Image (cartoon, rainbow, N blue to C red):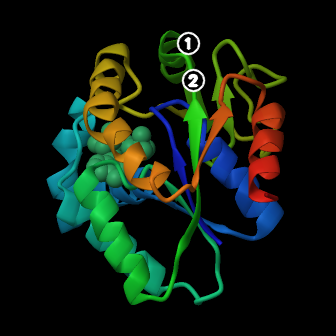
């Protein structure tokens, strides 16, 4: 089973993908995470991506499609995948079809997380993670039980994404509306798009996704 989680920045794609990894043994392929790792490692891809990411603009299609193809080649043929943050343009959707067909893989579901955009800005601007174990937190919605200490690993090494500021978030939203939303009809024509209300609690959204996957 290969699925796409689609939705604007802050819709909860990463959170839900992690849950699906735990519950179904699937693998999350997040181009955002891969690009951040490349920036940190200072690779050629990272050097190309850094300024674009900081501005909230999209990285060139061939760069992200290249890293997705490479990652899939590291996985077994029966390993289900959750695409998180990819594809984001019509050209990437086309590349994904080719990448999957070449590996005898097929998309089973595209899950669109439907969210209220104004609420998203608050969600994104307040979010941070534990730099040590990766647990996610929020200034308003999910504070650690003991201030400044991670609930999961006990470390005090929190970090925020450099592109999680209001100005960059607005650009990322614009990019989503202009380039990503228009790819939905490609999948609607195939009858594989399922809309899920992304504004509920993490558990509610997860239940709604599970219901879709069991169809
Ligand atoms: P994300 O973690 O998915 O919010 O992605 C963070 C940033 O990485 C985006 O704002 C883009 O600059 C870049 N990025 C991630 N995935 C893609 C993609 N599929 N195509 C182009 N740029 C991407």
Compared to residue 58, the image places residue 18 above or below, namely: below
Q: Is residue 131 visible?
A: no
Residue under numbered circle 1:
119
Compared to residue 190, the image places residue 121 above or below, namely: above
Asked whether 98 or 140 is in front, the reply is 98
Q: Residue at x 27, y 72 (%)?
A: 66
Q: Are marks 1 and 2 in contact (CB under 8 Å)?
A: yes
Circle 1 or circle 2, nearest the eye: 2
Asked whether 114 or 55 is in front, the reply is 114
Compared to residue 181, the image places residue 41 above or below, namely: below
Q: Quadrant of the N terminus?
A: bottom right
Q: Residues within 10 Å of mark 2 (few under 14, many from 20)?
A: some
Asked whether 77 or 35 is in front, the reply is 77
Q: How far apart are the two marked residues, 1 and 2, measured between alpha carbons?
A: 8 Å
Q: In the image, residue 10 lies at what x, y percent? A: 52, 30
Residue under numbered circle 2:
115
Q: In the image, residue 56 lies at what x, y percent? A: 27, 32
Q: In the image, residue 94 lies at what x, y percent? A: 29, 65
């Amino acid at each position: 089973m290969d699925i796409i989680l689609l939705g604007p920045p802050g819709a909860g794609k990463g959170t839900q993908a992690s849950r699906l990894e735990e519950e179904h043994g699937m693998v999350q392929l997040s181009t955002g995470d891969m690009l951040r790792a490349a920036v940190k490692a200072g690779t050629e891809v990272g050097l190309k991506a850094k300024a674009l990411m900081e501005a909230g603009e999209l990285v060139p299609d061939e760069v992200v499609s290249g890293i997705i193809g490479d990652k899939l080649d590291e996985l077994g043929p029966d390993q289900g995948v959750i695409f998180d943050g990819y594809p984001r343009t019509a050209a990437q959707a086309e590349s994904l079809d080719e990448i999957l067909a070449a590996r005898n893989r097929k998309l089973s579901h595209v899950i669109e997380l439907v969210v209220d955009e104004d609420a998203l800005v608050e969600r994104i601007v307040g979010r941070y993670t534990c730099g040590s174990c990766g647990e996610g937190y929020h200034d308003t919605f999910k504070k650690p039980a003991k201030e400044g200490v991670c609930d999961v690993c006990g470390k005090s090494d929190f970090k925020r994404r450099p592109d999680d500021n209001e100005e960059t978030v607005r650009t990322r939203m614009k990019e989503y509306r202009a380039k990503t939303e228009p790819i939905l009809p490609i999948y609607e024509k195939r009858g594989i798009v399922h809309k899920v209300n992304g504004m509920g609690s993490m558990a509610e959204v997860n239940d709604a996704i599970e219901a879709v996957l069991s169809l």
